[in-house]
Image (tube, rainbow, N blue to C red):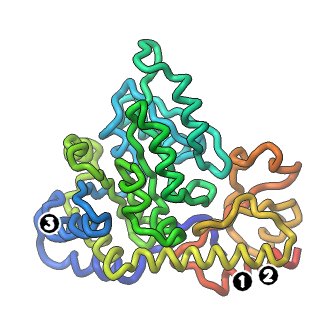
């Protein structure tokens, strides 16, 4: 029973079939192939506008390049202090921006609020010679604690940064899960709410290794071709990334996969809440469940062969902090998660 992460699952059958079909014969290199061009058109259709699309193979590359394209070396990126760009990307955003500062902010469930952002901006004086200048706000959708930003919440964050001219980046490693959870269009939670650049995740949602940087105003993407090449992410056989996205986006397959992952997480959360033995650290809004686990539950899970991650509790408000011996267990569901495995996990917890 593996609930460690959704990036431990393989690729979906349609994605693998699309890659196998693209593997046949010869094609133009470096992203000038028919697959990549078709995917660029698919993204324009998906987001209901012209967009600039840059395909890469990892989420770290997508995030780092998205920031580097719009932030200067003496700039700053505001984000939650547990965001991937701050805590899980080995300094790649700082490296590729040429040294821009990542400024971490607090927030319950790794969600930022306009008040917290506004307060931080007030501490960073515009034009001050001795301070980095804030140039971007980055949010994660869904957050590192599995919460989802609504279009209204995103628009409010955008309004908080407009007076200082910051761009808005969305780390969408689990973007599909957020769209599926909200039941809105991709456009509604991106550019229509003020997002300037999106890291569109495919790898956690059925792709083999496929991510995309989506720049909603192509005029802001002038440097991206060279930045991607310099970063080593302009693949000679770029058609194989394009093919993955073609398989993923066809007939709404990406959303079908996300809906299944979300449904499995919801199934687990409902089962746990019905037993009323354990508390959810945060609401289950996408494809992750975070449970407060006492020592006896941790022992039962280990004995039952359940694999999960003991997660940080620093994004919990002070009044909900853990007691001695407790951990927050993160259980992630994917497109490959089976209902019977969820039910087996729920049975292990029920028996504690």
Please determine whether, in this image, residue 286 is positioned above or below residue 169.
below
Q: Are marks 3 and 2 in contact (CB under 8 Å)?
A: no
Residue drawn at x 55%, y 23% is 123
The span from disc 3 to disc 2 (Cα, nearest Å) is 50 Å
State which quarter of the image contains the C terminus: bottom right
**Can residue 240 be seen by looking at this rendering?**
no
Q: Which mark is residue 33?
A: 3
Q: Are marks 1 and 2 in contact (CB under 8 Å)?
A: yes
Q: Earlier in the sequence, mark 1 or mark 3?
A: 3
In the picture of the structure, the residue carrying the numbered disc 1 is 343
The span from disc 1 to disc 3 (Cα, nearest Å) is 45 Å
State which quarter of the image contains the N terminus: bottom right
Secondary structure under tag 2 reads helix
Residue drawn at x 44%, y 15% is 128
Q: On the rendered structure, is 21 left or right of 3?
A: left
Q: On the rendered structure, is 260 left or right of 56?
A: right
Q: On the rendered structure, is 150 left or right of 108?
A: left
**Neighbour class for label 2 at 10 Å: few (<14), some, many (≥20)?**
some
Secondary structure under tag 3 reads loop
| Coordinates of residue 322 in the picture (x, y in percent) | 82, 50
In the picture of the structure, the residue carrying the numbered disc 2 is 347
Residue drawn at x 66%, y 52% is 109
Q: Are marks 1 and 3 in contact (CB under 8 Å)?
A: no
Q: Residue furthest bottom?
A: 340
Q: On the rendered structure, is 136 left or right of 118?
A: left
Please determine whether, in this image, residue 156 is positioned above or below residue 337.
above
């Amino acid at each position: 029973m593996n609930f460690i992460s959704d990036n431990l699952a393989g690729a979906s059958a349609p994605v693998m079939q699309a890659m196998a079909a693209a593997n046949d014969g010869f094609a133009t290199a470096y992203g000038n192939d028919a697959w990549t061009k078709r995917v660029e058109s698919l993204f324009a259709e998906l987001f209901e506008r012209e967009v600039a699309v840059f395909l890469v193979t990892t989420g770290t590359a997508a995030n780092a390049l998205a920031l580097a394209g719009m932030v200067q070396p003496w700039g700053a990126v505001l984000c939650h202090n547990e965001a991937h760009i701050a805590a899980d990307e080995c300094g790649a955003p700082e490296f590729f921006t040429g040294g821009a500062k990542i400024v971490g902010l607090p927030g319950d469930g790794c969600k930022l609020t306009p008040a917290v952002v506004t307060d931080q901006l007030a501490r960073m004086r515009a034009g001050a010679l001795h301070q980095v200048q804030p140039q971007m706000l980055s949010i994660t959708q869904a957050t590192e604690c599995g919460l989802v930003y609504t279009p209204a919440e995103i628009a409010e964050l955008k309004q908080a940064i407009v007076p200082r001219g910051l761009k808005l980046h969305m780390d969408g490693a689990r973007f599909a899960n957020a769209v599926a959870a909200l039941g809105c269009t991709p456009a509604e939670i991106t550019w229509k709410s003020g997002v300037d650049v999106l890291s569109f995740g495919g790898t956690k949602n059925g792709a083999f290794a496929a991510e995309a940087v989506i720049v909603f105003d192509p005029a802001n993407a002038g440097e991206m071709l060279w930045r991607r090449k310099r970063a080593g992410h302009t693949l000679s056989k770029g058609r194989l990334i394009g093919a993955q996205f073609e398989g993923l986006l066809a007939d709404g397959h990406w959303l079908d996969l996300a809906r299944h992952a979300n449904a499995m997480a919801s199934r687990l959360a409902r089962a746990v809440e019905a037993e009323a033995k354990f508390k959810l650290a945060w609401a289950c809004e996408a494809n992750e469940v975070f449970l407060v686990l006492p020592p006896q539950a941790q022992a039962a899970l280990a004995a039952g062969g359940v694999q999960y991650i003991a997660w940080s509790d620093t994004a919990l408000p002070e009044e909900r902090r853990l007691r001695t011996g407790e951990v927050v267990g993160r259980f992630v569901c994917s497109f490959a998660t089976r209902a019977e495995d969820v039910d087996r996990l729920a049975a292990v917890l029920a028996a504690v």
